[in-house]
Each structure stands twice: as structure tokens, then as C-alpha cells.
Amino acid sequence: MSISIPLNTTLQYSSSSSLAPSFSLFSPITSTAVSVTGIRQRCLRMVTSCVSNAQKSVLNGATDAVSIVGREQIRLGLPSKGRMAADSLDLLKDCQLFVKQVNPRQYVAQIPQLPNTEVWFQRPKDIVRKLLSGDLDLGIVGLDIVGEFGQGNEDLIIVHEALNFGDCHLSIAIPNYGIFENIKSLKELAQMPQWTEERPLRVATGFTYLGSKFMKENGIKHVTFSTADGALEAAPAMGIADAILDLVSSGTTLKENNLKEIEGGVVLESQAALVASRRALTERKGALETVHEILERLEAHLKANGQFTVVANMRGTDAEEVAERVKTQPSLSGLQGPTISPVYCKRDGKVSIEYYAIVICVPKKALYESVQQLRAVGGSGVLVSPLTYIFDEETPRWSQLLSKLGM
Ligand SMILES: Nc1ncnc2c1ncn2[C@@H]1O[C@H](COP(=O)(O)OP(=O)(O)OP(=O)(O)O)[C@@H](O)[C@H]1O
Ligand SMILES: O=P(O)(O)OC[C@H]1O[C@H](OP(=O)(O)OP(=O)(O)O)[C@H](O)[C@@H]1O
Ligand SMILES: [Mg+2]
């Protein structure tokens, strides 16, 4: 990379709120800044050093980034557009974290519930890059993007790996016609005699890092990659590539372009994740507390999201006897166990206990089965309602995070 600075150019340097110093070059024609020949040398040295720091940061991650100083706010990166954008905001809303973005073209926003945090909207790949350069502290992106642009950098920490949206997988696909008609697995693809050093397997992908790592791990030597920004599924039919490596969710795009996935060809499973910079968590004041709060809210919401509260009445002699009956059924154990409380009825002017109310949480998937089991042990009047949050004593991911941080 080379930089040329015209003789009459001045450099403005600021290290204001961001981690990395920023600099800008001003031409005297358009700015009032004064050029002093003596400063030029110093400016040149500063530019060279900034550029080389920036290059190092990109190559090595935040290890070489400027130290964590100068900025009070924690920065959370959210996808600025595309299929992850609305879902990220909806998830935070479900956690009672309301991102106040006045209009969609505004790239910075606040969350009133987290006054020390600012939101920056960025393209997903830039969120990962900026976590590594120290310009963001936290981010929500797909695991595919973390893998491709994070390149295994140890400064990136996955705080929550399953935010329950953006599900897809990164997979190799080949034509379902011609020489590939009978090829069903990666092994068969690798063993095709067509691929040689002179004529390698040509793969079109936006995931060249993960792609070449995967091919190496699977012992496929004769392979080259080409890249494009989208519509990769056209590449085989256009004669540009033999195979593609791209994200798949419904599989419609593959099908519509006469392509098929193969056994052993899935490079990774992806969904949205909460990612953090290790350095930010260990060095930036308040970052760890903020991530703890976000994690608690996320876990409480995501855990509750998969469950219903079920209330039923059950005739019995006492609470223990009802508990014994309920415990015979596998789907009725609840989180810790069923809550059983007496139902006070008035009969002939006297208060008596004939029924007990049982309250349990059941996984949504097991709802009908649970209702049947409740009925089988004498349950009646079953009420089912959605659960909004389950706050556990401590979230398991929090202790995992602390141990990843060596705390
Ligand atoms: N079918 C899918 N195709 C692509 N990405 C998907 C799919 N389903 C979920 N995703 C997730 O959405 C992310 C991409 O979203 P989107 O395509 O909107 O991003 P982008 O940065 O705008 O990409 P692009 O380079 O296509 O403009 C992926 O990184 C992945 O995590
Ligand atoms: O399995 P499916 O549900 O069909 O989804 C997969 C397609 O979606 C994505 O493309 P996108 O819509 O982002 O368009 P692009 O390829 O132009 O980026 C991805 O790159 C695949 O092409
Ligand atoms: Mg896309």
C-alpha cells in the first residue's frame, strides 16, 4: 500500500472518542489548514505509522490495536441492513432493550435501558472487522461471518452462539447434471479423475478462508477459488466454476439453478450470535457488566420462548400425594419440579380443600403430550399461557464466558 501526500497538503489528527486514532488529509484548496514544510515530515511519519497499525490490526486482530482508552461508551454493532437487521432489533425488543433509531439511514442509535452503550449499524462483515480493530466491543452477526472474517482470531469471543434467527448452513453444491450426475458425496467429488494440478476443481464462493481451510482438512489438493458478491448459483451453468460454496437455508436457490448438496459437504451450521472483543471485555470499563446484563436478558427471553406455563387442577388428599402422582409422568417435572398449591373451595358454607393446582413449565414441542399426561393422572381445567422470561439463578453462558476470559 502506498500513500502519496502532495507538498501542499496538511494532516489533521484526532484521537477523540475512538480507540484508533483517525487522520484526515486536507488540501489547502478546500480547507483553511496551513501547510508548514517542517510538519510534513512528521505528518508523513504519523501517516505511515497509522497505516501500518491499521494494516497490522486487520491482519492480526486487535492484538496490535491502539490501547483501550479514550472512549467511555460501550459499542454494540448491529447489522445495518439485509436479512439479519430487523431480526436483531426484534430480538433486543423482546428482551426489553429498545433501540432508538430515529430513521433507518441513521447509523448510530441509543438503547435507553443501557445508558452506557451506543449502537452502531454496520454491514455484518464490518462488525467482525471492527470488533478486531477495537472500534466495536460487541456485535450481533451470523456465525458464518464470524468464521470467515474472524479467521479464528482469539480476540473474538462468542458470548451466545444461538440467538435463534438467521439459521442457515454453508455448504458445497454441485450441478445435478453432466459429469456430476452420479456424485453424491464430498469423497466422490474429491476422487473424480478430472481434478489435476493443471485443471483443479473450481469453486465459486464468498467464503474463501473457510473454503480453503475445509478443503485442506478434507485432503482436497487440486482446488481453486473464485469469488463474487452474489448470485453464485449461476457460476456452474455459466462455466465459471465446477462447484459453489454458499449459504443455504430453504434450498430453493440451489434447486432453481439445478444444483445439489452432497454428503460431507457442509462446512458450518450458522445462526445469529452475540460476539465480543476479548480485549474490550477485559479492559474496557463497564463492558463486562453490560455483556452480563445483555446475556441475562437474552437467556431469559430465549429460554422462555421455547416453553409454556401450564396450570391444571387435580383432585387429591394432600399436596404430597398429588406430587407423587404428577411425578410418575415424564413430561411434568417442570423446571425444578411442579409447584402444587391448595385450591380453597366453599362447600355448604365451609372452606375445604379438595383440589390442588399444579403449575409447570413445559417445552412447546411437548405441550400436547404433557396435557395427555396431566389428564392421565386426574388433571382437569388445563390452562396454557405463553412464558415471557425465565431468569435462572445464573446463566450458564455467563460462567462459560468468565472461564473463556480466564476469570
Ligand atoms: N439463506 C441465506 N442466505 C444468506 N444468508 C443467510 C441466509 N439465511 C440466513 N443468513 C444469514 O444472513 C447473513 C447475510 O445477510 P445478508 O445477505 O442480508 O447480508 P449482507 O451483508 O447484506 O450480505 P450481502 O453481501 O449479500 O449483501 C448471513 O451471513 C447469514 O448469517
Ligand atoms: O436456500 P435459500 O433459501 O434459497 O437461500 C440461499 C441464497 O440466499 C443467499 O443469497 P441472497 O438472497 O443474499 O442473494 P445474493 O446471493 O445475491 O447475495 C445465499 O447467498 C443463497 O444464494
Ligand atoms: Mg446476501
Image (tube, rainbow, N blue to C red):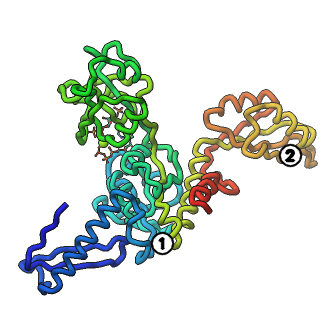
Disc 1 residue type (three-letter): Asn
Q: Name the residue under label 2.
A: 345
Q: Can you see residue 295? A: yes
Q: Where is residue 290 in the image (x, y as percent from the top left)?
A: 53, 66
Separation of residues labelled 1 and 2 (CA atoms): 52 Å
For the residue pair 115 and 143, the one nearer the viewer reads as: 143
Image-quarter location of ligand 2: top left
- Tell me the residue at 52%/59% (across/down): 96
Crowd around label 2: few <14 · some 14–19 · many ≥20 (10 Å): few
Say if 325 sits above or below 34 in the image: above
Residue 181, position as x, y percentages in the image = 31, 14
Mark toward the start of the polypeptide (1 vs 2): 1
Q: Is residue 87 visible?
A: no
Q: In this view, does 32 lie above or below 396?
A: below
Determine which residue is flagged by label 1. 116
Secondary structure of the residue carrying tag 2 is strand
Q: Respond yes or no on whether mark 1 lies under 8 Å from ligand 1.
A: no
- The image shows residue 240, relative to residue 182, as above or below, that is below
How many numbered discs? Answer: 2
Quarter of the figure with the N terminus: bottom left
Secondary structure beneath disc 1?
Answer: loop
Q: Is residue 27 above or below residue 265?
A: below
Q: Mark 1 vs mark 2: give the one in front.
A: 1
* Rendering coords of residue 43 (x, y %): 20, 79
Quarter-of-image position of residue 99: bottom left
Q: Which of 16 and 81 is in front in this view?
A: 16
